Amino acid sequence: MPVLLFLNSKIQFLHELDFFFVGTDFGVNRLCVPPTAPAEFGPEVDYVEMIREHMPQLGYQIYFMSEESNEEMDRYCQTAMLLLYFHLERGLEPSIEEKLLKYKDESIMYEGVFRKQLKEMGDELESMTIEDPEISYVISEVKKSGLSPALNWYRARKVDETDEEAALLPEAFSSDIQCIFIGAPQDPALPPGMFTEDLKMKMFPSGNIECTNIEGGNHFFAEAPSHRIKVTQVLGDWIDKKEKKNC
């Protein structure tokens, strides 16, 4: 059974795969981000106002949707990554961690906070040499294209919603596809509780999804040294179980 691994991606892409590849035998794993239905809000929604009024913990997305974020996050690409790793508990080397401790109680989830910290620390952190070989490698690769291409996801929501409505994608996920959602209880923006029992029944009426949490896990738990072995074990065990069942 081939398995598709989705980290921080929306469920509509999975619906599109199912829509265009009917009968394909594959499984789906989602890490951290709770599933959401296609065309959930409709193309007419004002996302900025919706976030401000109903979901302030997603306020950082308002900056990511703005044109200003393109130039600023590409210019301070290393700083942006280090701030994300710091606040979402990926783990950083002590020399960098110490510089960012003053921001520990300032949640970047809320509007304006991430941009403020990026501008305050940009010049200093961009010039630092990162000793951690893994983080150094990841940031060097991200720098090749910058962060701005990734931000297009936040700006294309209305297009996505229009495409999903036009494709008449079903709300319920196909019973032929086995799924697992591995949640991160400490993720302040996307806690597992967002995927309610009502949503599970609507989107997976056949019960073809398993849900589990990595206790203490935050947004980058798949990379964090403290959690990634557990994440790999949970995912590997699930794949083994499904393969044995299909034999």
Image (spheres, rainbow, N blue to C red):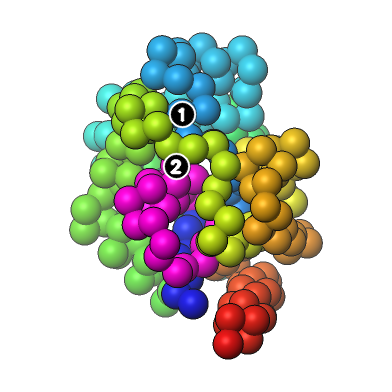
Q: Quadrant of the C terminus?
A: bottom right
Disc 2 marks which residue? 12
Extent of the magenta region? 8-30
Residue type at mark 2: give it: Gln
- Residue 94 location, x and y as percent? 59, 65
Residue drawn at the location 62% of the way across and 23% of the way down: 56
Q: Are marks 2 and 1 in contact (CB under 8 Å)?
A: yes
Q: Quadrant of residue 150?
A: top left
Q: Can residue 165 be seen? A: yes
Furthest residue in direction left, as rendered: 144
Q: CA distance from mark 2 to mark 1?
A: 8 Å
Question: Badge 1 local density, few (<14 within 10 Å), some, or many (20+)?
Answer: many
SS label for mark 2: helix
- The first of marks 2 and 1 along the sequence is 2
Residue type at mark 1: give it: Ala
Magenta span includes 25: yes
Question: Badge 2 local density, few (<14 within 10 Å), some, or many (20+)?
Answer: many
Q: Quadrant of residue 134?
A: bottom left
SS label for mark 1: loop
- Residue 95 location, x and y as percent? 54, 63
- Residue 176 location, x and y as percent? 54, 61
Disc 1 marks which residue? 39
Q: Is residue 89 above or below residue 44?
A: below
